[in-house]
Structure formats: C-alpha cells, structure tokens
Image (cartoon, rainbow, N blue to C red):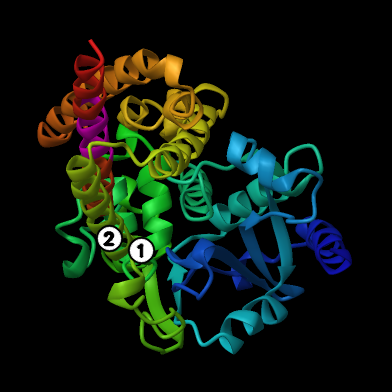
C-alpha cells in the first residue's frame, strides 16, 4: 500500500511536466492466472514517460477491508484505480508465467496529454474509488472508456478470436474461461440470474480482458487503426498459468448424479417398506434451503445487477426448510404434503422455463432437480397411502 501511495504521488507530481511527445501509451492484457478472480485475465494502461514508467490499474481492492466478503456478496464492490511503477507491477505476472500482450496505442501529443489529465483526475482521493461491475464496468472496460475519452471518439472493436466467436452471452463467455473450474461456474450459475444470458455484441464481450486482447489489433477509432503495434511481453501459452481440468469424478455433475443414484436407491427402499426415510429428506431439503437463503439474499438484498431475476427461486428458497423441520412432527404431515405438492408444481414450471430458454441451466442442476422431484412425489404418495390405511 505504501508503494501504491508513493507511486500515485509521483505520477501526480510528474503530470504537470509530462513530455507527451516522448510518452508511450499502451493497453496491456494479462492472460488468466490460477485463482478464480484471474480466470478472465486482467487489463491495465501503461504510460511510459521520460520521467517514469507507470501501470494504471482499475482492478485494485483490499481483502483486508472490514466485512470485505459480506460487502462483496452484497454488491458493494468498491474498487479503485492505482498508479504503480511498471516494472514491479509486471514482475508478479511474469513470475506466475502468464501470457502478457502490450498494444501500443496510436495517439498524438494532445490525446496523450488528455489521457494523462483524465488518469490524474481518476487518481485523486475523491475520485479513485468506483463501484465495480463484473460485466459492465471492470478492469478492462473502464480503461477502454478512458482511452475513448482521450481520443475523442468511439472505439470500434473487431470480432473476437475464432475460439470465442460462438459465445453469445456473458454466461457463455464465462463458461469458456471457467471450463477447468466447474465448481466456480456452478456457483455462478446458482447465483447469477437471467440477465447474463441475453445476446451481447462485440463491445460487451470485451468485459473479459482475454477477449479484448484478441479484438484490439483490428480495432478502429475514427476510421483509423487504434493500435500502432502489438508485442507479447511474455509469449507464453494462453492457459499457461491456469490449473488443469478438474477430474470428472469431482465435478458438480458427477457429484449430483451420485446423489441422484442415492436418492433413487433410498426411494425404492421407501416404496418397498412403505415408509419415508425422514433423515434423508431433512438433509436434502436443508441443503436446498441453504442454497435458497443465498439466492434470496442475492435477489432481494444484494445490489449486484446480475443476480436478479433468478428463476432458481422457484426451486431453491427458504421454504425448502419446511420438510427439514416438519417432517419430524407426525401431526404436520399435511403441512409437508401441501409443501411438496406446491414444490412439485414449481419444479414443472421451472423445467418449462429452462426449456424455453428463459435462463441457462447448469447440467448439474438437472440431476439435483430430479432428486427434489423424486422425493416430493414419493413423500406425497407414501403419506397419502398411510393416511388412507388409517381411515
């Protein structure tokens, strides 16, 4: 932090005496790293002046801030812009083996000065914090916008590289880069609603720095090329720092299918002995209820734009705790039966909405939903049968 503050003060002090004719402005993209927050990569501006060489990053945050995790989940994602010396900044990325590509921007002296002015304004204490948005206002889109303001015209981005050409929504772009991290994608598919499933254009795909990196060489501004030249600072493979694929048996799909097999086995046993295995239903619906609490928090309390609407609330909601609690009380069987009837209807509605393409579905959800439906039907059937036997 002291280094960041010192670099910030230095950049601001050099601002007034910047020799823009000898200044080089670059847009630098860092390819994915190992950690989940690095999977789409990172972007930064590089401003190399005779007086100093700086990285301008719009992706700085502090894990040690009070209640960081709660505030992040709630959507209070306050990031800030920082100016740091270029060489120490890039060194950490080089150590991790990540591919790094620098695109030198074609700008005249007036445009460079305008960019330095804008960055200096951003770095002021009252301006440097901004509300980060994962897909609309992040470490890639914000410096791109700053460049546009300095150039005085809109940047027209080229079509993404061929391996991304078929990705048409925020979610499918994420899946492309999360393919080795299926549990992370499972969490995203659980937490984020239908807003990230709409069709997006080339500019919106640039929320992912790696996609933006493939677009910049062909980008134009005012009818001319944006980039004067491109160079790989570290010519490593695009996925050189990414963890290997998760073993198939440890993926969410494999785990959910295993749970489905256990559910079927217990249900067959229940039907043969004509008795509900209450501990299993209590545990299963407690699991669904916990997921429902998270989704409810994200939809009704969080200010994250992408979390609502989320049709998974039809399936995963706090009402899932009803079987967990009331299944142990014999006098409340009618309460549980009533819940399971409503629950089963909701599952049918959810399935229809999935088929209609209202919201993308994670493949693991299908097996989990089947577990819910099987236990709902079996409980209704066995309870009604028991009540008729007692008449």
Which residue reaches farthest top?
391
Q: Can you see residue 219?
A: no
How far apart marks 1 and 2 lie (CA) works out to 9 Å
| Local secondary structure at mark 1 | helix
Which of the marked residues, 1 or 2, is nearer the chain's N terminus? Answer: 1
Disc 1: which residue? 182
| Residue nearest the viewer, comparing 258 with 25 | 258
Horizontally, residue 364 falls left or right of residue 63, namely left
| Residue nearest the viewer, comparing 252 with 358 | 252
Q: Which residues are magenta?
A: 372-380
Q: Position of residue 292 (x, y in %)?
A: 45, 33
**Quadrant in which residue 360 is drawn:** top left
Quarter containing the C terminus: top left
Residue at image point 44% right, 43% down: 279
Residue at image point 34% right, 65% down: 177
Q: Position of residue 12 (x, y in %)?
A: 80, 56
| Local secondary structure at mark 2 | helix
Q: Position of residue 85 (x, y in %)?
A: 73, 73
Q: Can you see residue 379?
A: yes
Horizontally, residue 38 falls left or right of residue 183, namely right
Dot 1 surroundings within 10 Å: few (below 14), some, or many (20 or more)? many
Quarter containing the N terminus: bottom right
Horizontally, residue 35 falls left or right of residue 314, namely right
Residue at image point 31% right, 37% down: 276
Disc 2: which residue? 253
| Residue nearest the viewer, comparing 278 with 324 | 278
Q: Vertically, is 311 above or below 273?
A: above
Tag 1 and tag 2, C-beta contact below 8 Å: yes
């Amino acid at each position: 932090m002291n280094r960041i503050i010192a670099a910030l003060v230095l950049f601001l002090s050099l601002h007034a005496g910047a020799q823009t004719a000898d200044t080089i402005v670059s847009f630098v993209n860092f390819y994915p790293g190992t950690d989940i927050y690095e999977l789409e990569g990172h972007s930064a501006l590089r401003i190399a002046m005779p007086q100093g060489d700086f990285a301008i990053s719009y992706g700085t945050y502090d894990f040690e801030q009070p209640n960081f995790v709660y505030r992040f989940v709630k959507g209070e994602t306050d990031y800030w812009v920082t100016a740091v010396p270029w060489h120490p900044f890039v060194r950490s990325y080089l150590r991790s083996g990540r591919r790094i590509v620098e695109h030198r921007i074609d700008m005249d002296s007036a445009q460079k000065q305008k960019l330095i002015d804008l960055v200096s304004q951003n770095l002021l204490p009252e301006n440097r914090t901004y509300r980060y948005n994962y897909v609309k206002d992040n470490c890639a889109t914000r410096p791109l916008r700053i460049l546009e303001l300095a150039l005085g015209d809109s940047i027209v981005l080229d079509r993404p590289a061929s391996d991304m050409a078929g990705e048409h929504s925020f979610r499918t772009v994420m899946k492309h880069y999360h393919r080795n991290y299926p549990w992370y994608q499972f969490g995203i598919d659980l937490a984020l609603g239908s807003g990230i499933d709409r069709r997006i254009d080339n500019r919106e795909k640039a929320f992912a720095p790696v996609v933006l990196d493939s677009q910049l060489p062909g980008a134009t501004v005012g009818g001319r090329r944006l980039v004067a030249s491109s160079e790989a600072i570290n010519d490593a493979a695009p996925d050189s720092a990414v963890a290997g694929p998760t073993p198939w048996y440890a993926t969410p799909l494999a785990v959910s299918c295993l749970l489905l097999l256990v559910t079927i086995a217990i249900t067959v046993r229940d039907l043969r002995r004509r008795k509900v295995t209450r501990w299993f239903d209590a545990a299963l619906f407690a699991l669904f209820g916990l997921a429902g609490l998270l989704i409810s928090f994200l939809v009704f309390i969080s200010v994250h734009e992408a979390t609502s609407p989320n049709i998974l609330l039809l399936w995963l909601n706090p009402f899932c705790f009803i079987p967990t609690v009331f299944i142990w009380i014999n006098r409340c069987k009618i309460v549980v039966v009533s819940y399971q009837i409503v629950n089963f209807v909701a599952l049918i509605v959810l399935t229809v909405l999935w088929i209609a393409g209202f919201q993308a579905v994670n493949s693991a959800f299908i097996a989990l939903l089947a577990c819910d439906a099987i236990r709902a039907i079996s409980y209704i059937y066995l309870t009604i049968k028991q009540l008729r036997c007692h008449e």
